[in-house]
Image: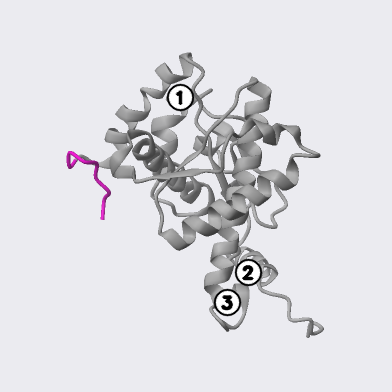
Amino acid sequence: MPIRGPTGAHVAPWVFASLSEEKHAHRYGGKLFYFVREKPIGSPGQVWGKNTDNNWENKREERTLECLSEAINRLCRYAEHEDQNILLFQDMINEKQRFHQVKRSYAHIYSRIKEHQEMLRILEAPAYIDSELSTNIQCADWVAALIGRACDYQLVLNSSYRWVADSFFADLRGGFTYESTLQFYRRSIGNIHHIRILDRARPHLDSLTGMSPQNLSLLQLVHARASAPTTGKPAT
């Protein structure tokens, strides 16, 4: 089912028209940022083992908190490079999640300050705003949607999102911080940085070119097994 913008138009041209305005923001020092960490392949049971005592939900929350912490690190490094202070705003979530994320963010920031002075650049832990009340958060939602489709194109062989690379690469060149990264999970290739997330080139999939279907299936099986939890028992 095609995704549509608020006027009913397909998302591609609507987002394109909106994000093309980012060129004007760039003139005043504005930048886009993303941080994406590839998840292990497999179902929750394959990746985390048996779901006991709400284990899967706790693992999901921990993964979110780890990515949030890494995003804060990268934004602080960028702020230090630009000699600027920053405030972070996020889309509103439920109260329980907000409490844990704010608590974890404060602890993370203060634990790094001694050895990482760039952490002083963030003035507060992330604040939460309902996207319906903030055009900035709405814009961030659309950027996240764009990056999500770009990741699909980078990682899924038969992805239907090539239009992302065809439509946005030229207009958003220079619009991302270098700290923006798609971080691969246990792959023998380098991560993707800044505008390269929107490139037609797909390093992971291009590395598989010429591989027979049988060998490709074996490689995918090896990667899936590497993503599975370690049981401590010797391999058989």
How far is the residue under mark 2 from the one under mark 1?
Answer: 35 Å
What residue is shown with label 3? 55
What residue type is disc 1 on? Answer: Ala
The reply, left or right, for residue 91 in relation to residue 73 is left
Q: Residue at x 33, y 37 (%)?
A: 134
Residue 118 in the figure: left or right of residue 86: right
- Which is closer to the viewer, label 1 or label 3? 3
In the rendered image, the quadrant that contains the N terminus is: bottom left
Q: Position of residue 119 (x, y in %)?
A: 68, 36
Q: Is residue 84 above or below residue 52?
A: above
Alpha carbons under labels 2 and 3: distance apart: 20 Å
Label 1: which residue?
170
Q: Residue 172 in the image: state x and y as whole percent.
A: 46, 26
Please identify the quarter of the rendering in which residue 12 is found: top left
Specify the segment rendered in magenta. Answer: 1-8
Please check the rendered image and state whether residue 126 is part of the magenta-colored stretch, yes or no. no
Rendered image quadrant of residue 224: bottom right
| Dot 1 crowding, Cα within 10 Å, few <14, some 14–19, many 20+ | few
How would you classify the magenta stretch by its main secondary structure?
loop
Near-viewer residue (25 or 99): 99
Residue placed most toward the observer, 223 or 141: 141
Position in image of residue 69 (x %, y %): 62, 48
Q: Residue at x 68, y 74 (%)?
A: 229
Q: Is residue 26 left or right of residue 220?
A: left
Residue type for callout 3: Asn
Of residues 80 and 217, the one nearer the viewer is 80
Q: Point out the tag, 2 or 1, that comes first from the N-terminus.
A: 1
Q: Earlier in the sequence, mark 2 or mark 3?
A: 3
State whether residue 77 is above or below residue 189. above
**Structural distance between the alpha carbons of marks 1 and 3:** 44 Å
